[in-house]
Every structure is written in C-alpha cells, then in structure tokens.
Amino acid sequence: MDYGGRNWFYSYRKLFDICTETKLQSVTGKILTQYAALTKNWDATTNSEWTCRTYLSTKMILNATVLTNALNYSNEVGLRIANPYFEYYAALSLLRALVYTIPGEKWSDGELMKISHPKAINVSFDWIAKFDKDTAQRLKRLTQQLKAQREVISYKVPASGDSILDTEYDLYELLIILAEMAQLNSELLEVSVLKNASPENFIMNYEHMTQIAQYEIEGYSFTDREGGHRLEYIRRKQPHPLNLALTMTEGQTEDFIGAWDGEEKGMFNNGSPANWQKIFDVP
C-alpha cells in the first residue's frame, strides 16, 4: 500500500483518512527519528524487549477481537449487562497494544504491562494527536465514555439497567484506528531495526519471555503455557521485531481465539476465522 511517500505492508482501512499524505510523511519521519535513537544503539537486551513488546501487541489485538465477538454473542442472547465491559476492555486492550509500540514508553522490567487505565488513555491519544488533534480528542472522549459506562454498571448498579447509557457511537472506528496506529508504529520500528541493528543482536532473553508468560497477582501464580510456546517459536524463527501483521501467524490466532470457544452446541463460539477481521486483518 503506497501512501505518504512509503510502501506500507498493511492495507490500512481508516488511519490514513485522519491526515493528509504530507502530514503523514512529516509525522512518520519524526517517529523514525525516535526509533533510530533506539536502533542505532541496539543490543541483545533491547532486541529481546522490543520483540516481546510486539508479541504483546498482537495479543492485545486478538484479545479485542475475542471481546467484540463476545459482544456480538451477548447481543444475540440478551446478556446486555456484559456489553459495557466488552466494549471498554476491547478499547483498553488496543490502547495497550499501541502503548507497547511507542518508543518513549520504557519497559521498566515489565512494569509497562501494569500501566494504569488513565495513563494508557493519555499516552495513546497524545500519540494519535501527532496525526490529527481533532480525531485524538474525539476518540479520547469516546474512550472515557466507555470507561464511565462500564463503571456505572459495575459500581452504581442502576435500577434502570442499561437504558441510561448512550450507544450512539462508532465503536469500531475507535478500535480500528487504535489497532492500525500500533501496526503503523511496528512497521516503522521494523524498518529501523533492519536498517540500523546488527543481526548478531537478534537474540531473545528468557527473562523477558518469562515476564510475559508467568504472572503473580495478589499472591497467586499463573503460567500461560500457550504464550510460552508462542514466544519460543518467535525466539527460534523470527527473533527480532517484525510488524504486527507479520508477527501474527495462523496458528497463533486460531489457538488464542479458539481458547475461548464453548465446547457444546449453543455455547459462545468465536466462529470461523473469516469472521475475525472486523478490527484487524488477522491471518
């Protein structure tokens, strides 16, 4: 896809509509300068961190896909009480996908994975404002609305149910732009890595992989075996940051999304891979 003086790997649906080619070329040039500050000093640790960050971003996109599939199922069977949760957390997943690709956001020994909701919102829309301030402000307000609607149902439990909520918004415009912004960043990162980094540093550290696949929360430990398997595949096959659409594989997407399918007829099912494309071109 040719636009803004560059050939893009991904076929963007909405992102390029928010700014002119001239503006895009200017902004992406500045972003490349930020990535170059990283990639000209690339070492094995930096490579490992950013390869893991791109993997995390793909997980966030897949999670948003599952949540919006659940939203559709909820509408079909009348479980509207869950809809504000599905909408807001789909948006939050994609905010995190974007944050993980922003060069100025430090990994800080995995603490970035604990980024607060308000900070994820502010960081993401400050980034989008580089391309268009009006779009960033409008979508930030929508995200804050989704957050408020999830909280009012969860914490205030209105006797009026969801009749007090506003549903006159384009959820998928928000989700697609967030996912595509993360994809655009990852394309620029990949270009910068291939231009500046030495292949001898294309190494992944088990420390970073463990931070992603093993968790301890409130004294409880969890192990994501499938996540560990995927990271090991990346370590063996593609141990440096690739753009998100290229990082994803059919096996990854089928296993991640399929993990949430019900086992019996009539239970929630994510459906065919042909139906997973509403937010992002999932392979």
Image (spheres, rainbow, N blue to C red):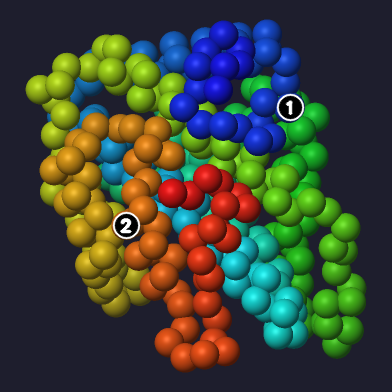
Name the residue at 60% across, 50% down.
279
Provide residue 10's location: percent of width, then percent of height. Answer: 51, 31
The residue lying toward the viewer, choosing from 73 and 43, is: 73
In this view, the mark in front (2 or 1)? 2
The answer to whether residue 111 shows anywhere in this view is no
Instruction: Give left or right: position of 198 versus 180.
Output: left
Residue at the spot of label 1:
18
Q: Quadrant of residue 161?
A: bottom right
Q: Where 163 falls versus 234 (above or below)?
A: below
Type of amino acid under label 2: Gly
Q: Nearer the viewer, residue 54 or 207?
A: 54
Q: Quarter-wise, where is residue 195 in the image? A: top left
Location of the N terminus by quadrant is top right
For mark 2, does the 10 Å Cα neighbourhood hold few (<14), some (14 to 19), or many (20 or more) residues?
few
Q: Is residue 159 above or below residue 98?
A: below
Which residue is drawn at the image coordinates 65% and 61% (left, top)? Answer: 88
At label 1, the amino acid type is Ile
